[in-house]
Image (cartoon, rainbow, N blue to C red):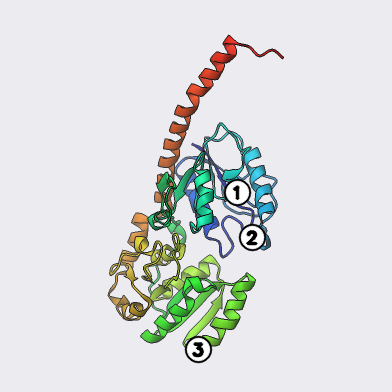
């Protein structure tokens, strides 16, 4: 297949540090090429994903995250220049709503964020002419009346992740500096279990900085170490040496890439039963799922878990190859359905043109 991928203008593919959507698109693009498909990627010009990229885009614009103007200009150019592809997979919010996109190419989009009521309204409108992919069953279960073409869990490139020994004697937290990610709950869990905690967190936005300065920093003690935001190699080293990843999220996170990253290093995950966590963590096998109050006792049971089983769960269920194969299956089905719908219409128009030529 010839597959066009569109991602927003704000971060590179892959991201230098934080950036879940861009990291997933990078893994998907590479895996599609490895499977023998042609991929054309519309992304910021300083992206380093090793697949053919559309030229002429600006460099990444992290300071403009969420700005409609920059996203619209980006996706309009992407659709205009995408060229001769069989299907377009758009990972932006604005792109599938663009009315002047090519009418002879099927478009599919992935819901990367939470399906709030306003977002659900947008996706219902998109679904009139765009196939929708959800990233977890929990994500699409929270709205009604939204046709979902497929639920496809994220995957990661395991060749870039080594299995650690968990010999560091600490638990770790990796995420974004905000209350929803459950950092303060992770601190409480580690303290109750008597385990040191190392914290790696993205902290760019003003509200993230305020939360750290006003809530987190004053609460940290000698048992906690704040590391800031880490690169991928640094992150995987942190995870691989940890006895467990603490992920006591406080919202219905649609997926949670950090959990499969930790499992890929062989590190068990302790999570609250929110969002997609129960779809990722196998309770008592690759970690534990429970309330914040239950997870401290679970942390003491981590040595009974198999790090090999954690890694194997990603190899079997969350690899980039599996993710790409499920996308290819969906792409093929959508292309077939698109052709079935369009061919009769084209033939009909041609017949009309033969019977009643237009006089200019």
* Residue at which label 2 appears: 65
Across and down, in percent, residue 286 comes to 32, 67
CA gap, disc 1 and disc 3: 44 Å
Q: Depth check: 44 or 189 in front?
A: 189
Q: Depth check: 48 or 199 in front?
A: 199
Q: Secondary structure at mark 1?
A: loop
Q: Are marks 3 and 2 in contact (CB under 8 Å)?
A: no
Eye-nearest disc, 3 or 2: 2
In the displayed structure, would residue 54 be above or below residue 240? above
Query: Which residue, as the protein is rendered here, is positioned at the far top?
Result: 355
Q: Earlier in the sequence, mark 3 or mark 2?
A: 2
Q: Please give the label number shown on residue 221.
A: 3
Query: Which residue, as the protein is rendered here, is positioned at the far bottom?
Result: 222
Eye-nearest disc, 2 or 1: 1
Category of crowding for the residue at label 3, using alpha-carbon neighbours closer than 10 angstroms: few (below 14), some (14–19), many (at least 20): few
Q: Secondary structure at mark 3?
A: loop
Tell me if 285 is positioned left or right of 24 in this view: left
* Residue at which label 1 appears: 94
Query: Which residue, as the protein is rendered here, is positioned at the far right?
Result: 360
Across and down, in percent, residue 283 comes to 30, 68
Q: Earlier in the sequence, mark 1 or mark 3?
A: 1
Q: Could you tell me how many numbered marks the image carries?
A: 3
CA gap, disc 3 and disc 2: 33 Å
């Amino acid at each position: 297949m010839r597959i066009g991928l569109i991602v927003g203008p704000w971060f590179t593919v892959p991201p230098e540090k934080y950036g879940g959507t861009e990291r997933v698109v990078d893994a998907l693009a590479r895996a599609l090429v490895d499977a023998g498909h042609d991929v054309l990627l519309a992304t910021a010009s300083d992206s380093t994903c090793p697949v053919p990229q559309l030229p002429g885009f600006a460099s990444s614009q992290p300071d403009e995250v969420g700005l409609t103007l920059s996203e619209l200009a980006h996706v309009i150019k992407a659709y205009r220049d995408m060229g001769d592809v069989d299907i377009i997979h758009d990972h932006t919010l604005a792109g599938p709503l663009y009315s002047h996109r090519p009418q002879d190419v099927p478009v599919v989009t992935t819901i990367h964020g939470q399906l709030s009521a306003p977002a659900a309204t947008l996706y219902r409108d998109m679904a009139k002419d765009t196939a929708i992919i959800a990233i977890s069953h929990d994500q699409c279960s929270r709205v009604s009346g939204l046709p979902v073409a497929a639920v496809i869990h994220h995957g990661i490139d395991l060749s870039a992740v080594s299995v650690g020994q968990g010999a560091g004697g600490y638990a770790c937290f990796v995420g974004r500096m905000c209350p929803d990610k459950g950092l303060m709950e992770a601190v409480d869990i580690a303290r109750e279990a008597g385990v040191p905690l190392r914290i790696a967190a993205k902290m760019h936005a003003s509200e993230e900085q305020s939360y750290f300065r006003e809530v987190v920093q004053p609460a940290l003690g000698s048992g906690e170490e704040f590391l800031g935001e880490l690169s991928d190699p640094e992150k995987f080293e942190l995870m691989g040496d940890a006895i467990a990843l603490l992920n006591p999220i406080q919202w219905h996170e649609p997926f949670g890439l950090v959990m499969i990253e930790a499992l890929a290093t062989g590190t068990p995950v302790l999570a609250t039963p929110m969002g997609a966590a129960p779809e990722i963590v196998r309770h008592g096998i690759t970690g534990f799922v429970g309330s914040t109050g239950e997870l401290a006792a679970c942390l003491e049971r981590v040595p009974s878990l198999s790090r090999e089983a954690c890694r194997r769960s990603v190899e079997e269920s969350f690899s980039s190859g599996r993710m790409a194969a499920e996308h290819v299956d969906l792409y093929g089905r959508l292309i077939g359905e698109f052709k079935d719908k369009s061919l009769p219409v084209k033939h009909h128009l041609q017949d009309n043109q033969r019977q009643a030529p237009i006089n200019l």
